[in-house]
Amino acid sequence: MRALRKLRRGAGQIELVDIPPPAPDCGEVLVQVMRAGVCGTDIHIFHDAYKNLEPPVTLGHEFSGIVLRTGPGVTKWKEGDRVVVESLASSCGSCRHCLAGDTQCCRFRKAYGISKDGGFAELVTAREESLHRLPSGVSFEEAAMIEPLCVAVHAVLEKSNVQAGDTVLITGPGTIGQLVSQVARLVGASVIMVGTSKDQARLNVATATGAEHCLSSDREDTSARIARITGGSGPDLAFECAGVHAAIQLCLSAVRTGGQVVQLGIAGRAIEIEYDLICLKEVEIRGSFTHNKRTWERAVALLSDPRLNLNALVSGVYPLEDWGLAFEKTAKAEGLKYLLAPNVP
């Protein structure tokens, strides 16, 4: 079968190769991959900037497909079931985080596409516990968006204090920022989205999917505009999804006294901020990292809400052999989410 693999450490070192098809072991399911999303993590892996990578490995951790075969002991799944697969391949199961259900915090967690062969392939094996059944009417394209949706659901519904009537500030109009906006609006919050002039197409998508205010930080004084929008008090919460200094500082300075900042963006380096504002404004700061099984169950349940628009974020679908183009567009931030189609249709 064809698989897109990181063969060894170093920049590049990714090739579309033919490898033997996997066979499901005890408790595993063989999935025919229909759609798989290209993520910023995949770009970091291309540039050898992801330290937890275990090559050689097939990439891809956002994927949906069809059950092709089940291994010994599997009773919940059968051939033909339409599924989405969690990105978590395994965790230790015994640390305090695993016992609390917070597997995303396990030091020994393994992920598909990073430590275990993932979804940029025609076939993949996955633990039966990693699968979720797709509701009828949900496309494979939408299903491949569930992993980033989970990132937003975890931040908004599980880590923040957002309530109906709140105003939330979101910095970074990429896929995660867009989904945070949509989930926050499902709760009943109004959204201020901030990007730059280079993000205009993305800001247009945010407007089309319901964000009330979209601002370009290099075209106007965003702090002053945010103050006017909120009557001088500042937004109730801020979700930082860009991971850059200016955005982190804006969230901290703009949020109201007693407000909350949820940090999703990863800077990858030390960031200098106006630290005293945390004390002087009594700002609560929370980190939000990926998701857990509870999150996946909530996200899949949200798919039935007609207000959720995942298709608006899909900028293109490419056959597996055109992976380079999908990677290039993702790296250049052209559009939002690009999907690979190992099996067509």
Image (tube, rainbow, N blue to C red):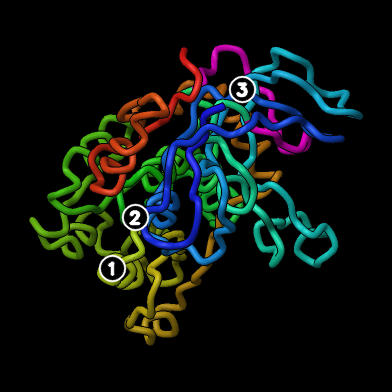
Q: Residue furthest right?
A: 73
Asked if labels 1 and 2 touch by Cβ distance under 8 angstroms, the answer is yes
| Sequence order check, earlier mark of 2 and 1 | 2
Q: Which residue is mark 1?
A: 250
Asked if residue 236 can be seen in this view, the reply is: no
As shown in the figure, which amino acid type bears the numbered disc 3?
Answer: Gln
**Mark 2, residues whose alpha carbon is within 10 Å: few (<14), some, or many (≥20)?**
many
Find residue 300 and name its label: none
**Mark 1, residues whose alpha carbon is within 10 Å: few (<14), some, or many (≥20)?**
many
The residue nearer to you, when weighing 300 against 33, is 33
Q: Which residue is mark 2?
A: 169
Who's the residue at 72% across and 38% down the image? Answer: 130
Q: Residue furthest bottom?
A: 276
Magenta region includes residue 341: no
As shown in the figure, which amino acid type bears the numbered disc 1?
Answer: Leu
Q: Which residue is mark 3?
A: 32
Q: CA separation, marks 2 and 1? A: 9 Å
Q: CA separation, marks 1 and 3? A: 44 Å
Asked if residue 96 can be seen in this view, the reply is: yes
Q: Secondary structure at mark 3?
A: strand
As shown in the figure, which amino acid type bears the numbered disc 2?
Answer: Leu
Who's the residue at 61% across and 28% down the image? Answer: 123
Magenta region includes residue 133: yes
User: Where residue 313 appears, x then y in whole percent?
Assistant: 35, 32
User: Where residue 297 appears, x then y in whole percent?
Assistant: 68, 36
Magenta segment: 124-140
Q: Nearer the viewer, mark 3 or mark 2?
A: 3
User: Where residue 338 appears, x then y in whole percent?
Assistant: 36, 34
